[in-house]
Image (cartoon, rainbow, N blue to C red):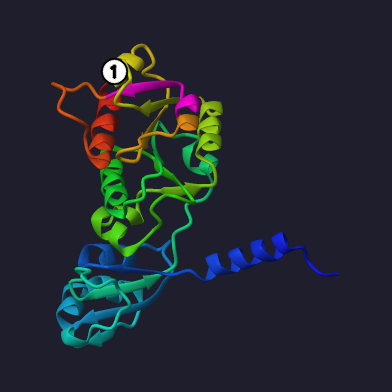
Amino acid sequence: MKKPKWVVEKEQAKKAQAAQTVWLFGLHAVRDALGNPARDKLRLIVTQNAEAKLADAIAASGLTPEVVDPRKFNAPLDPGSVHQGAALEVKPLDWGSLEDRCFDAHRVILLDRVTDPHNVGAILRSAEVLGAQAVIGTRHHSAPETGALAKTASGALERQPYLRVRNLADAITELQRMGFIVLGLDGEAEETIEAALDGLSDRPVALVLGAEGPGLRQKTKETCDKLVKIDAAGAFGSLNVSNAAAVALYASLKA
């Protein structure tokens, strides 16, 4: 019996995902990936200078590097990538399910259509520094795990859970069932983060940020418990989304 088209397409998508690899680049990103036992490492290309700088990490990883001339650096990276003489092919990380990562969490960040890898990388770095337990995006219309994202994250990608879910509104509802209060960042909101959390310091908090420009989608706004704003000194416009994530997370921790 012939399989239905949707079944074939689903199986093909699953195979494609299993075969997917990512090229990380830059000394920080490569060093931290080499030292991550959860990371499936496939191929390492380095210049002699980078090999010397990464010697301990390479030795500990057990990976045999391909040492190349700097003028013939042949890793398949985007032109202009600042690779610093090091590139590592890896499998994407599997952080498990939303419930696995967030059941005992106290702070998480959700991203609604934030597609710029540099923004997501910076958010991962802030999330690690400020103690968030996860950053959550969507499988579509969000930044995937890439070399540019990893380089901006400066190693945080290896330690800070980055989950990508099928539906953001469903993820918000699941977090609410776990006891989270979900706050959506909206420049037109009346209430500040501190005011929204007054008397709720014992509750875990999920902060939802949208893409610069369009902001949160209407469905996302409707699903959040409250819409909040960052308390600003004056009407000077909005923050970059990565800066807003850091400020909002810090404000939620101090509330």
Instruction: Residue 14 in the image: state x and y as whole percent.
Output: 60, 64
For disc 1, the neighbor class at 10 Å (few under 14, some 14 to 19, many from 20) is some
Residue 90: tell me if it is visible.
Answer: yes
Residue at 28% x, 61% y is: 148
Q: Where residue 155 sits in the image (x, y, percent)?
A: 27, 57
Front residue of 234/90: it is: 234
Q: Which of the two residues, 165 or 154, is positioned nearer the viewer here?
A: 165
User: Which secondary structure lies at badge 1?
Assistant: helix
The residue pinned by badge 1 equals 194
Nearest the viewer among 46 and 70 is 70
Q: Is residue 114 left or right of residue 81?
A: right
| Residue 83, image quadrant | bottom left
Please state the horizontal and vertical placement of residue 239, each as a whole percent of the image: 21, 35
Q: Give the residue furthest to the top.
A: 199
* Res 180 seen here: no
**Amino acid type indicated by mark 1:** Glu
Residue 59 placement: quadrant: bottom left
Reply yes or no: does residue 79 show up in magenta.
no
- Quarter holding the N terminus is bottom right
Residue that lies at the very extreme toward the front in this rendered image: 214
- Residue 224 magenta-drawn? yes
Q: Residue at x 29, y 23 (%)?
A: 229
Q: As displayed, is residue 190 above or below residue 59?
A: above
In percent of width and height, residue 248 lies at: 28, 30
Query: Which range is magenta?
Result: 221-229
